[in-house]
Image (spheres, rainbow, N blue to C red):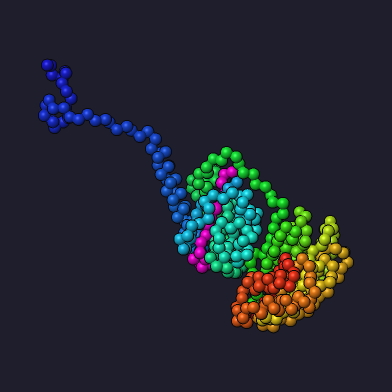
Amino acid sequence: MQPGFDQPMTMPGLPLGLAGDQFTIPAVVTAPRAAINEARDHARQANLDQRLTAVLRGMVRGLACDGADFYVLNDATNELVLRAHHQEDGREPGDKRRTLMGSSADVAALAGNALVLEDDLDVATWAVPVWCGAAICLPVASDETIYGTLWIYCREPRSFTNAEVELVEIVAGRLAVELELNKWRSGASANIATPAAEPTATPIVVKQPASSRIARPMSHPQLDDWELAGLAFTGERVQSFYDWQTLADGRTLVVAGSMNTNEQLTDGLLEAARIALRSHAQHAGEAGELLSAANHTLWLASPGGEGLSMAVAMLAADGTHATVALAGNAGFAMWSGSSSDWTATTCPAMGWCENTNYASRYVELMVRERLVLATTNEVPPVARFNGRLACKLREPSAAELRMLPGKRALRLFADAMRSGGAEPAGMALVRRR
């Protein structure tokens, strides 16, 4: 055998003639940049998740709430996808995917309306992802992109101040900034905030509901002298609303209104009345003058119909008295302890007649006395109605009545109205502190 021919290949360090184990030379990675980019994107998304969760955690703890969910729109804009959440008590968040068509509260928020739900009655009115006692829903958007909605929940009913709602708005803006920064860092032009969406065979077409809801005041104004609350009962043939606004001169406008009809124009007329009252409030000296001016405006804009029932109060800046005006099936009550004095109206509904002049009634509120504005399906006889109200309002103790927050006091009064044969629609409550 000649050297160099027909000899088995040996590894260095092995005795001649003993062949080593065969091995394969590892393949050279030809595209390391793709693997690096993938790892970088994964780390970036993980960091984004941590930052979003940390922002939600700080908001929940800062406002003494119980949880928060951040939903983003998918690429087809027909679903809301849970992007981040934080729950203090460890309970489950909202559904991971929710159809936009079945999320009325989110649709209202995406349209630019902040929803502040302060008790279980408000929560039951809207499609809230998590059953709770109180919640806030706000849009999360930048100057150019609408990303989704932010929810914050409380287990028990509670009220939110303007400062608290503004803080949630700031948090929503922070979430939008985080998504914008992540979009800039990744260089992506698509909706990078949304997890990979499952393909759907048939896209969901979101239809505008036949009748939209009237915008509610964002939250309670910061008033030292007055406590405010409102309820709106809406059915198949009744649409209602409540509203309040602090004027530049220190006075406060409080309104409750409704309309008994099933026409699609109802919401538009109620919103027109709300805007007219706000527009004329600054220049009106008292509630009757305001209601007369708004009635003329509404009559010019209204195509005619059944008219609107309206209860309007102008609260003085000194925090002791108010003027009240009524139209249609409306009334007001001075409520102190277990006794109340109900006053109804015989004036025509708002929008019926161009030249109707509504009279003002001057009322003075004692400390802890409540003024209730209400519209109803029909106004019962005052004497019998006052007796039924007094009977129902005597059920809680005097101490319980003093401690009742505004919304719960209004629900108690609404039950008392039903016991007297009147179905409440729009209601607002004013209490002197």
Name the residue located 43 percent from the left edge and 46 percent from the top edge. Answer: 42
- Please give the range of residues in magenta: 61-77
Q: Residue at x 42, y 38 (%)?
A: 34
For the residue pair 377 and 253, the one nearer the viewer reads as 377
Q: Is residue 297 magenta?
A: no
If the image is split into quadrants, where does the C terminus sit?
bottom right
Residue 294 as seen in the image, left or right of residue 97: right
Question: Which residue is painted at 77% across and 66% down in the image?
Answer: 377
Residue 330 relative to residue 181: left or right:
right
Q: Is residue 390 above or below residue 421?
A: below
Asked where in the image residue 354 lies, by quadrant, the reply is: bottom right
Q: Is residue 255 visible?
A: no
Q: Is residue 212 visible?
A: yes
Pinpoint residue 311: horizontal percent, then vertical percent: 76, 70
Residue 62 counted in the magenta span = yes
Q: Dividing the image into 4 quarters, which one contains the N terminus? A: top left
Expressed as whole percent of the image width and height from the top left, the position of residue 410 reads 67, 72
In the image, residue 341 sits, relative to residue 79, either above or below, namely below
Q: Is residue 156 left or right of residue 319?
A: left
Task: Give coordinates of residue 27: x percent, y percent.
Answer: 32, 32
Q: Residue 407 or 433: which is nearer the viewer?
A: 407
Choose top left, top right, bottom left or bottom right for residue 90: bottom left
Residue drawn at (61%, 76%), measured in percent from left and top? 404
